Amino acid sequence: MMHKTVCAISFFFCLAASACQAQGFKLKKEHDSLYWLNDWRITYPVYQFQTGDVDGDGSEDAMVGVIKSTRFYPEKARRLFIFKQVNGKARPMWLGSKLGGILEDFRFIDGKIRALESTTDSLYAVSDYQWSGFGMKFDHFIIKGVDKQTALKTFSQ
């Protein structure tokens, strides 16, 4: 369990060194908009990288936070991609366009993805999401309708 925390905390140091490795996944930065997760090309800026067993099958998955637009949400924003490892290669499980609110950051805790989200009325929420076969499903709010400082404190616990 410790490797998840270490990788998350050291993520920015990893990017400065051009690579971060965790549980068989290696994220390598070529430049600000080109990364490689093992053999998978990621052509967007990356803001977060963690590993954990997202789908509960006993194997580590990679969670990569990217900044991009989508067909349904044309404004660039933080998104979440989740990858499986198949024979040493990264393969997408979910290339998410949106969770619930406006994604600010995420962490992997107790088999769930904890999201720090903002709302259109400048309030914040911390929510848990879990895998549901083909993507992430809302599980519950940890806290909602609060200011940024309160949300950050809750998110960081």
Image: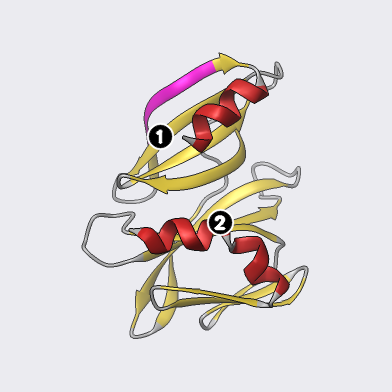
In percent of width and height, residue 39 lies at: 52, 83
The count of marks equals: 2
For the residue carrying disc 1, how many other residues have a C-alpha within 10 Å: few (<14), some (14-19), or many (20+)?
Answer: many
Q: Is residue 23 above or below residue 53?
A: below
In percent of width and height, residue 109 lies at: 37, 45
Label 2 or label 1, whichever comes before in sequence order: 2
- 56 displayed left or right of 89: left
Q: Is residue 121 shown to the viewer in this render?
A: yes
Q: Residue at x 47, y 20 (%)?
A: 143
Label 2 and label 1: CA atoms lie apart by 20 Å
Asked if residue 140 lies in the magenta stretch, the reply is: yes
Q: Residue at x 56, y 41 (%)?
A: 98
Q: Circle 1 sits on which residue?
A: 128
Q: Circle 2 sits on which residue?
A: 9
Q: Secondary structure at mark 1?
A: strand
Asked if residue 29 lies in the magenta stretch, the reply is: no
